[in-house]
Image (cartoon, rainbow, N blue to C red):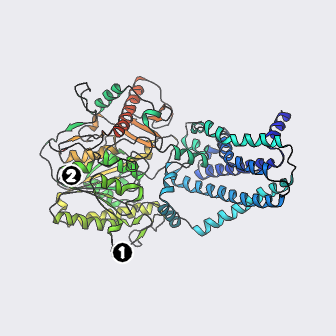
């Protein structure tokens, strides 16, 4: 065995190419240390049980070797063909090269720690997005962390790593080269290695356990970033499990209370006539989507910290939906669900996809009824393509650029403080009321976002914590409602307050429902009954429910239900985490993954569920939602229907 290993070593690392071996050892050791640090940072002692940690470390080492191969190829070529008569120059080149590599390794390791702290994940779609919005991301990091200290630590760590590597590399510069043919064969192997890695490494290798966080630990930041970059848009029908098209149409039609499709009714099963149960209520509507408002921040859901006194009061004075689930973990997913009533299909949200204008959406229904749809945002709406998306879908977009400096009490990289946003919103609604225009205003908050900063003196929690940011946003919403009560339009307005997503990242299962649980409060004294609705529902149901509360009749292309009318008979939620899309019903979660894989797990335990007939039905329902939603976007079936409200 030793003779075999020596022969492999001689074939791959002849002469000076032994320096490549030193690079691999350093890269593997540093990434193993990063992996252990992430495990410790996670705070779960069970990660260090040998039968859990060792497989994660071993699988991670395979990904680390694959990532290192892309650096090893040019390094091997340089070492093999550098003239022997210039060892001093080679040593200088290697010193600079390894200093750069050490800096990159430490910087990526630190970035992974920051990313893990925020999202409980290796690099994914969000990290790819951050390459596009560098101004906001760099600004957020500068405002959230002590950058001089952080950069100093990175610099010192990089210098120490460089010293540890180069002290082993430098003596090998003078190693005899050996026969040219042996060097050429070794270099050829190293030049082929990246192609073999590209063809052979698969993200599925790290899915060795039922614990999603442990699987994330087995990943590699370099590989996962590249994988997310390549897979940021996935064609559902190409990569995911499907049903025969007619069967999928029948299943979805049943879910949407439609008659079975036939040759005589070629329209898609999600296209249907919605009839109000009485005269239309021509109320203004203000929909507030709150950044990262998890349900468990509210006393109504058991929180005892007193973070949301104003929201809890509104929940008591209005209608509280207790079992609503967000579709994703990012703002654009929440906006997609609330605006389009569309399932979270794999890849980017539609808000960020091409050809996303002219779609059937909540604002379009209001517009057809004579309302002006508004999107009001305290930041710059170019971020995440929000401005372009809402403008292309009939909304009037008003953002940070419309707020004068004299009207700003506080701002950071994400935008103005929520109280300044609501003051701007109040002025915009006053203007529409004075012009006798009914309005539908979608307001998106920003303050509950790292660095969790807000004006001093508003609440009793200092800035810098998420709990403080939640309480500040609660204060700003309460202030807005108080101001609205003094307006002539208050008595003719329905307010809906919902989260865009929760503050939670991954859990121990791939799609834990508790990580998607959000509140919905509908408040309109004299128009909305007081109480609680305990129906299991999805964020895609919010729009149809608000329209139902107004008794609007329209022809719909929404995938969501009116929770108050249809929801009790179709209790389900849809949510996604990057490439895995899910369907939650009857205590089970169906997980649909690329390569046509799926898993059905118990929502409470995360353990695999038995494959009974009910599980098979849920699998069909899940596939039908995602398959037909994906097809609808590709084929243009989501486009605006002419005369949508003429019923």
Where does the N terminus fall, quadrant-wise?
top right
- Name the residue: 58% across, 67% down: 147
Q: Is residue 84 left or right of residue 369?
A: right
The residue at which mark 2 appears reads as 367
Q: Residues within 10 Å of mark 1 (few under 14, many from 20)?
A: few
Apparent side of residue 586 relative to residue 141 in the rendered image (left or right): left
- In this rendering, the answer to whether 415 lies above or below 633 is below
Q: Is residue 603 above or below residue 410?
A: above
Image quarter where the C terminus lies is: top left
Q: Position of residue 338 (x, y in %)?
A: 32, 48
Q: Secondary structure at mark 2?
A: helix
Height in image: 25 above or below 489?
above
* Image quadrant where residue 483 sits: bottom left
Residue beneath disc 1: 405
| Name of the residue lying farthest toward the left | 279
SS at mark 1 in the image: helix
Task: Residue 644: give x, y in percent of width and height.
Answer: 20, 44
């Amino acid at each position: 065995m030793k003779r075999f290993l020596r022969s492999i070593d001689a074939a791959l690392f002849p002469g000076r190419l032994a320096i490549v071996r030193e690079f691999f050892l350093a890269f593997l050791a540093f990434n193993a240390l990063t992996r252990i640090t992430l495990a410790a940072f996670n705070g779960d002692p069970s990660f260090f049980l040998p039968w859990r940690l060792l497989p994660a470390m071993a699988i991670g080492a395979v990904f680390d070797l694959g990532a290192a191969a892309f650096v090893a190829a040019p390094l091997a070529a340089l070492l093999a063909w550098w003239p022997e008569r210039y060892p001093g120059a080679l040593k200088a080149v290697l010193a600079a090269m390894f200093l750069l590599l050490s800096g990159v390794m430490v910087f990526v390791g630190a970035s992974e720690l920051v990313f893990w702290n925020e999202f409980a994940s290796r690099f994914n779609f969000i990290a790819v997005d951050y390459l596009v919005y560098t101004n906001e991301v760099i600004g957020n990091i500068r405002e959230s962390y002590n950058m001089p200290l952080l950069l100093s630590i990175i610099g010192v760590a990089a210098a120490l790593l460089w010293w540890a590597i180069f002290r082993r590399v430098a003596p090998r510069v003078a190693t005899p080269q050996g026969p040219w043919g042996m060097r050429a064969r070794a270099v050829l192997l190293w030049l082929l290695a990246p192609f073999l890695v590209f063809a052979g490494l698969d993200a599925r290798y790290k899915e060795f356990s039922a614990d999603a966080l442990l699987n994330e630990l087995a990943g590699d930041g370099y590989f996962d970033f590249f994988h997310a970059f390549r897979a940021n848009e996935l064609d559902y029908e190409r990569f995911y499990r499907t049903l025969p098209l007619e069967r999928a149409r029948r299943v979805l039609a049943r879910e949407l209370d439609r008659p079975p499709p036939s040759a005589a009714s070629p329209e898609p099963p999600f296209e249907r006539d919605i009839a109000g149960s009485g005269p239309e209520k021509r109320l203004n509507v203000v929909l507030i989507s709150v950044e990262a408002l998890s349900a468990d921040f509210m006393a109504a859901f058991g929180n005892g910290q007193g973070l949301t006194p104003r929201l809890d009061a509104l929940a008591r004075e209005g209608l509280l939906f207790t079992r609503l689930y967000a579709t994703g973990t990012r703002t654009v997913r929440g906006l997609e669900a609330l605006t389009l009533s569309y399932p979270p299909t794999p890849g980017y949200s539609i808000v960020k996809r091409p050809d996303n204008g002219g779609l059937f959406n909540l604002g379009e229904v209001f517009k057809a009824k004579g309302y002006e749809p508004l999107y009001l945002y305290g930041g710059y709406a170019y971020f995440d393509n929000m401005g372009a998306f809402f403008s292309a879908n009939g909304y009037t977009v008003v953002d940070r650029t419309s707020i004068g400096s004299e009207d700003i009490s506080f701002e950071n990289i994400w935008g103005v403080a929520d109280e300044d946003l609501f003051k701007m919103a109040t002025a915009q609604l006053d203007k529409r009321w004075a012009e006798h225009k009914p309005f539908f205003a979608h307001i998106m908050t920003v303050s509950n976002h790292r660095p969790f900063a807000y004006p001093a003196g508003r609440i009793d929690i200092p800035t810098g914590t998420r709990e403080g940011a939640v309480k500040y946003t609660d204060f700003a919403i309460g202030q807005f409602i108080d101001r609205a009560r003094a307006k002539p339009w208050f008595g003719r307005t329905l307010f809906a307050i919902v989260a865009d997503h929760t503050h939670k990242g991954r859990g121990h299962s791939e799609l834990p429902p508790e990580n998607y649980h959000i509140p919905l409060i509908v408040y309109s004294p004299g128009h909305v009954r007081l109480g609680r609705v305990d129906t299991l529902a999805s964020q895609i149901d919010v729009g149809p429910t608000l329209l139902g509360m107004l008794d609007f009749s329209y022809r719909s292309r929404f995938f969501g239900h009116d929770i108050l009318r249809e929801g009790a008979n179709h209790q389900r939620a849809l949510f996604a985490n990057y490439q895995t899309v899910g369907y939650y019903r009857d205590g089970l979660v169906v997980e649909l993954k690329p390569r046509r894989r799926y898993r059905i797990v118990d929502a409470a335990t995360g353990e695999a569920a038995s494959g009974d007939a009910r599980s098979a039905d849920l699998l069909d329902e899940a596939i039908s939602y995602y398959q037909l939603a994906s097809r609808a976007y590709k084929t243009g079936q989501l486009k605006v229907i002419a005369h949508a409200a003429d019923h």
